[in-house]
Amino acid sequence: MIILIEKVEGIILSVTPYKESSKILNIYSKEHGLIGVIAKGSKNLKSPLRANTSLYTYGYFYIYYKKDKLSLLTQVDIINSYMNIRNDIEKISYMAYICDLTYQVLKQNDNNNIFDLLINALNKIDNNLDPLIITNIIELKYLDYLGISLNLDSCSKCGKKDNIITIDGDVGGYICQNCYTNETLVSLKIIKLIRMYYYVDIASISTIKISDDIKREINLFLNRYYERYTGLYLKSKDFLNKITSTI
């Protein structure tokens, strides 16, 4: 049986040393989703694969593809090594968290749209857009693929679209004036921004200007929602929280 070399677009989500000179790469590819790839000899100093098989490298990977088995890597053409992110500890902390979160989402849903969401988010952070805002946008969009999306179009209790006055994680989204009981009230600006985060096309974003107080409040809301409903515990999230609390 002849196995042809296939060119796939992807990003390396994890790297594991294998024997003395090789690596096993966990690549999230546009064509096949998550695939395991062995990069033979890539730890050797003279290997052409050495520099191109580092964590979070985004590129075209030429592989002998084997479904449900380890594929063999032969060549890499880098699209973006995200050097701007790599040179900033805050940005790389956001990138690590986004990639870890993506991996967890893919375990539950391998929708093709997730790939473009991830790459567009990393590209925007690499281009110096606010990493917290981009991360929160990704978190909101990923809720759909985790099966715990928020209702951001109508009241979560009665379904009416008029007189929305707050948003609450416990009820799963918006609450109108008639259905309001004792939920925490948030500003109309936050209500509108969370909806904008959810619907915005990341690729189309060129500038973002939101006050620090509003950003923190939206981030806190999403942190609480994720903690309560996803069951995910990510070390990269803990590290990100520690880094950003000192900056």
Image: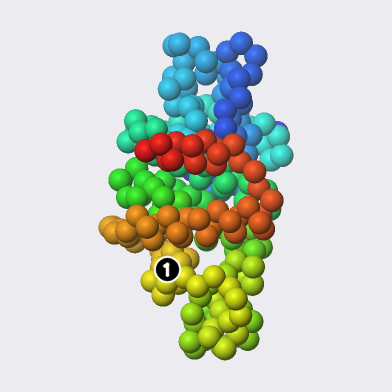
| 224 or 37: nearer the viewer | 224
Quadrant assignment for the N terminus: top right
Residue depicted at x 41% and y 63%: 201
Residue 90 image point, x, y percent: 40, 37
Residue depicted at x 50% and y 55%: 220
| 38 or 227: nearer the viewer | 227
Residue depicted at x 64% and y 72%: 171
Residue at the front extreme of this rendering: 182
Q: Residue 243, relative to residue 46: is it above or below?
A: below
Residue 20 image point, x, y percent: 61, 11
Residue 214 visible in rendering: yes
Total marks in image: 1
| Residue where numbered disc 1 is placed | 190
Q: Is residue 27 left or right of residue 79?
A: right
Residue depicted at x 39% and y 32%: 89
Q: Residue 103, relative to residue 74: is it above or below?
A: below
Residue 16 image point, x, y percent: 61, 24
Q: Residue 52, relative to residue 43: is it above or below?
A: below
| 215 or 75: nearer the viewer | 215
Residue 25 image point, x, y percent: 58, 30
Q: Amino acid at mark 1?
A: Ile
Quadrant assignment for the C terminus: top left
Q: Residue 106, relative to residue 193: is it above or below?
A: above
Sort mark 1 into few (<14), some (14-19) or many (20+) by Cα contacts within 10 Å. some
Quarter assignment of residue 58? top left
Q: Is residue 141 left or right of residue 121?
A: right
Residue 4 visible in rendering: no
Colouring: rainbow
Secondary structure at numbered mark 1: helix
| 130 or 227: nearer the viewer | 227
